[in-house]
Amino acid sequence: MLIANTPLASYRIILPAAAMEGERDVAEVLRDTLTRATGVTLEIATDATPAADCEIVIGKTDRDTEKVISARAEDADKVEALEFVVGAGSRCIEKPLKDLRLRSNVLIAAVIHGNECIIPNGNTVISAGDRAIVVTTETGLRDLDAILE
């Protein structure tokens, strides 16, 4: 698998040195989802380690996000990890994920339902009030419905 024309195995996941539990959970869910999907397990490190060329950054770190994959995607070849709170009017709720027509280059990496972090499969159903972690190369996504075709 390639991200921005670079092998996935070249990347690592970076968290703030003082990461909150939710940030650590997201990093682990992303790592585990990518491992299941590709067989590649990414290292999780903090921003206290020296910067590398290929990083997926979660949370507020001291990294220069122009050079790494981050929650900021000013270039089309960058990857975003976005968190959306799912509204009651969303077209994504109360339907199995397998029935949603997602845009290309979009992955729902996790669904957080209350205090439970779910690594979704095709039968996972998102409810109003859930939080969805979306990994994408798409830019300008403002809400969860924007991931739909």
Image: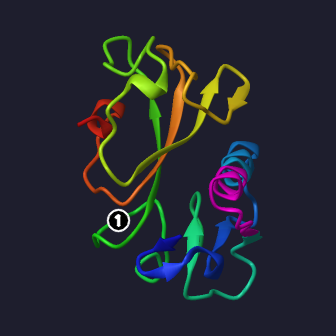
- Residue 42 is inside the magenta segment: yes
| Relative image position of residue 131 (x, y in whole percent) | 53, 29
Above or below: residue 133 compared with residue 88: below
Q: Residue at x 49, y 74 (%)?
A: 2
Residue 54 quadrant: bottom right
Q: Which residues are magenta?
A: 30-43
Q: Is residue 31 left or right of residue 64?
A: right
Q: Residue at x 39, y 63 (%)?
A: 72
> Foreground residue, 137 or 34?
34
| Relative image position of residue 104 (x, y in whole percent) | 32, 50
Q: Is residue 87 left or right of residue 113?
A: left
Above or below: residue 71 compared with residue 96: below
* Dominant secondary structure (helix, strand or loop) of the stretch shown in magenta: helix
Residue 35 quadrant: bottom right
- Residue type at numbered disc 1: Ala
Above or below: residue 110 compared with residue 78: above
**Residue under pointer 1:** 73
Colour scheme of this structure image?
rainbow
User: Dot 1 surroundings within 10 Å: few (below 14), some, or many (20 or more)?
Assistant: many
Secondary structure beneath label 1: loop
Q: Residue at x 57, y 66 (%)?
A: 57
Above or below: residue 137 compared with residue 7: above
Q: Residue at x 70, y 88 (%)?
A: 50
> How many numbered dots are placed on residues in this image?
1
| Relative image position of residue 5 (x, y in whole percent) | 42, 81
Q: Is residue 129 left or right of residue 31?
A: left
> Foreground residue, 80 or 147?
147
- Residue 144 is inside the magenta segment: no
Residue 114 quadrant: top right
Q: Is residue 69 left or right of residue 33?
A: left
| Relative image position of residue 20 (x, y in whole percent) | 73, 49
